[in-house]
Each structure stands twice: as structure tokens, then as C-alpha cells.
Image: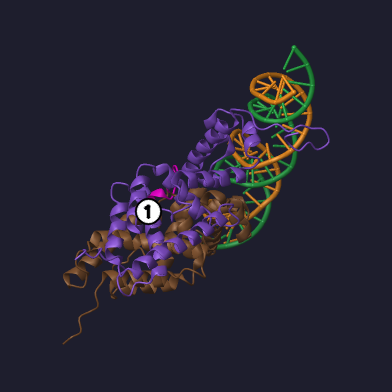
Chain colours: A purple, B brown, C orange, D green
DNA sequence: AGAAAATTCGAGTACCCACTCGAATTTCAT
DNA sequence: ATGAAATTCGAGTGGGTACTCGAATTTTCT
């Protein structure tokens, strides 16, 4: 027997198309939550977008809350920011590259921005996700800034922890302004400006 | 005749307690929208908090949208940030003072943060308010930074417009992180750090 | 005091919400 | 092929939503 058979029932895995269906649903939910927020978006909206009944949707994700959590996990997969450490690039280059990449996926940025602020409201299911995300990001960037400091490439007087906190804040704030006025706000420019203030140029090898 | 009398009707102003009622309702709506967002908060919640029927509430504010706009206007009155120019203080001091003040009114900060991000979603009634607010803030701060630059107190290479955009972004981003982790994030510290990087100390009068 | 206007509310409307239940249909391992 | 599991859905449940309507009550002006 390949699987547990409690009594005499034989469990069978999900069918072939199942995984693809789940991805389709997640993409639709991603759109809906980005456009209307978690509270403003409905399961019916998502089901309609997939071309599925609301009931069938709930077969894959047993509650709206579960759907949201899955969408947030998928967002992490798309952006790959769950592991901001394992880059070979330096801090500056990796941040700028991601920011440039984000310019092409405004929907993902919108989802992030909308849900992040919504999550500070009472008993929002995304609250833990964002709290932990910020904690992780601050720690990760603080380490990178500390490395730069050790190389003498951090401007004297700058605290790595504070720089990390500020970098995350600046980035998020710029994205919010960019979503409201894409023509007038340049996220990458703002981040470059901050790095120019904080990290000193690499010493020429003389 | 003191007022227009179309036909023969004699208009009478609102009664004595009316204005106070309106303020009470606005305060309750402020709380509700901060705690649950615009979409998540209901007129019933607000009415319950005031101790009024939902119908009576709609006598004062004919729609939920109107109520939100009134709340946003009231927020401006509270923080007085509609006129960030007419301060006698310097840019740095006035920003830091406001940030210190905000530490005592987390509810106002929460309302602002939640509604701002929510307003980037489809056809949100607050969208215009926040778009215009950002435009106004960026222009105002850019002028202040330009004044500093004229006095030789802006670090060389720093663009006033970019600094204004970044200051607003940093401030908002710090507030978001502060709401999610008040013990770990210090908004004032982050802002001071940025000013230390960007504006040079006043030349001693020798 | 009397009348009109402002305020209050109970009841109702039409609609949307997340979620459940039971049954029909499709897939797939044997 | 066949039977059991996975998938789908129609119908319903209980509840909430913003908002309307008509009438009762309270306030204010004359």
C-alpha cells in the first residue's frame, strides 16, 4: 500500500489539471485583491474571472482567508524576495535591479501596497505576513549595510539598522507615490539618491 | 427677508446641537475607518458608536462617500498639514515636530496610512484627495529644500525635487512600519537620520 | 401658542457576502 | 470497464450592505 488507508478508503492525489487550476485561480485572485483590496474583492469576482463557480473555487481554497495567504505566498515566489540574501551582487545593485523589475509589474506592486496598509486594520489575516516580512527585510538589509560598514563603504555616522529601516520605508513609500502618479515619481531615482548619500564609492585599486 | 424664499418656504438653519453632532459623527467615523478601512467599515458601525440610528446618520452625511470626504477634511484640520508652508520654523524642525506630535495620535496615522493605500484601488473615493495631497506636499517640500540649497545648506549633488519626494516617501513608509511594530521602529529617528544626510549644519557665525 | 422646519427612526428594498449541502459529472487507478 | 475519488455546480443559509420612504418627534421662529 502506497498511502495510508484508514479503514479501507484509498486516497488518491489531485487530478492532472488540478495544479494548473490552482495557479489560474491564484492569478485571478491576485488581480482582484490588487484592484479592490482583500475586503473589497469578493470570491465571486475571482470565480467569474476564472470562469468557475464560486463553489468550485472554494473546493481549492476552503476560505477567503486561505486564498489570501496563498496569494501572498505566490507573490513571494514571483518576486523571489523571500531570500534576499543569496544574491551574489552587492546590496545596491540587487535593490536597484529589483526596483527596475518592479516597474514592469505594477499589479504586483499594487497588491503589495494595498494589502500591506490594509493589514494594519483590525484582525486582518495578512497582518502576520507583513509584520514578519518587515522584520526579515530589516534584519537582512541591516546585515548588508553592516558588511559595507566593515569595508569602510558606509558613510561615517550612519547606523546600519537605521539605514535598513529607512531603505525599506523609502522603497515602499516611493512605490505608493508611483502608483498614484507614475509619470511624476521615479522609484529607482529615489533609491539611487539614497544610496548615493549612504554608501561611499568603492575605493579605486591603487 | 433674511434668506431666499423660493415660492413661500422659509429656510431655517440647522438647529443648535447640529454642528456638535456632526463633529461627534466625524470622530466616530474617523475611528471606524482607521480600524477597518473605508470598505471594511460600515455606516452601522459608525451609527452604533455615536448611539444614533443609521438613518439619522445619513441625515447628516447623505452617503458613505460624503462621510469619508468629510473625515479626510477633518483630518486636515486636526493635523493642519493643509498649510505646511506658513510655519516660521525651518523645514527640519517643523517636520520633526509634526512627527513627534504624530506619536501621540496613532489613530490619525492609522487612518491616513490605511486610506492612502486603499485609495489606489479601483474607483476609490479618496483617490483624488491623496493624489492631490502628494502633489502639494512634494511641491511644498521641494521649495523648502530649494531655499536650503540657496543658503548652501543642502548637500552638494542633492536635487531638491528628489529630496522632497524621498522625504514624503520615507515618512509614510516609516509610519507604516511603526504601526506594525511600534516598539522596533522609530519614525523620528529615521527622519533625523535622513536630514543629517541631506542638510548641512548651519554655519557658525564667525 | 402655533406652525414650519430640523431631527430622529422603524421598516423596508434590493443586493452582495462568505460559506454549506447534496448531488451530478469527470477523471483515473485498477 | 468499473468503481471510487476528485471535481463541479445549483440551490440555499444567514447575515451584512448602503440607502430609501414615510411618519413621528423635537426644536425654533414668529
The residue that appears at 48% across and 65% down in the rendered structure is B178
Q: Which residue is mark 1?
A: A88
- Identify the secondary structure beneath mark 1: loop
Crowd around label 1: few <14 · some 14–19 · many ≥20 (10 Å): few
Which residue extends farthest right? Answer: A7
* Total count of labels: 1
Of A55 and A190, nearer the camera is: A190
The magenta-colored residue range is B120-130
Of B116 and B193, nearer the camera is: B193
Q: Chain of mark 1?
A: A
Q: Quadrant of residue D22?
A: top right
The x and y percentages for residue B152 are 17, 72
> Is residue B67 something that shows in the picture?
no
Residue B31 highlighted magenta (yes or no)? no
The x and y percentages for residue D28 are 53, 62
* A114 sits left or right of B130 in the view: right
The x and y percentages for residue B148 are 21, 70
Amino acid at each position: 500500500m502506497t498511502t495510508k488507508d484508514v479503514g479501507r478508503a484509498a486516497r488518491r492525489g489531485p487530478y492532472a489539471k488540478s495544479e494548473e487550476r490552482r495557479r489560474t485561480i491564484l492569478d485571478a485572485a491576485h488581480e482582484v485583491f490588487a484592484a479592490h483590496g482583500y475586503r473589497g474583492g469578493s470570491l465571486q469576482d475571482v470565480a467569474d474571472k476564472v470562469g468557475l463557480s464560486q463553489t468550485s473555487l472554494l473546493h481549492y481554497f476552503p476560505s477567503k482567508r486561505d486564498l489570501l495567504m496563498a496569494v501572498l505566498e505566490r507573490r513571494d515566489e514571483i518576486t523571489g524576495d523571500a531570500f534576499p540574501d543569496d544574491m551574489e551582487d552587492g546590496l545596491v545593485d540587487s535593490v536597484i535591479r529589483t526596483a527596475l523589475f518592479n516597474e514592469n509589474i505594477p499589479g504586483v506592486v499594487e497588491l503589495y501596497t494595498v494589502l500591506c496598509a490594509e493589514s494594519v486594520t483590525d484582525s486582518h489575516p495578512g497582518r502576520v505576513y507583513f509584520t514578519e516580512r518587515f522584520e526579515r527585510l530589516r534584519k537582512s538589509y541591516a546585515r548588508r549595510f553592516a558588511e559595507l560598514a566593515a569595508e569602510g563603504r558606509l558613510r561615517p555616522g550612519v547606523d546600519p539598522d537605521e539605514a535598513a529601516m529607512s531603505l525599506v520605508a523609502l522603497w515602499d513609500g516611493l512605490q505608493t507615490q508611483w502608483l498614484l502618479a507614475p509619470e511624476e515619481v521615479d522609484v529607482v531615482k529615489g533609491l539611487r539618491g539614497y544610496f548615493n548619500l549612504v554608501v561611499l564609492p568603492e575605493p579605486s585599486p591603487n
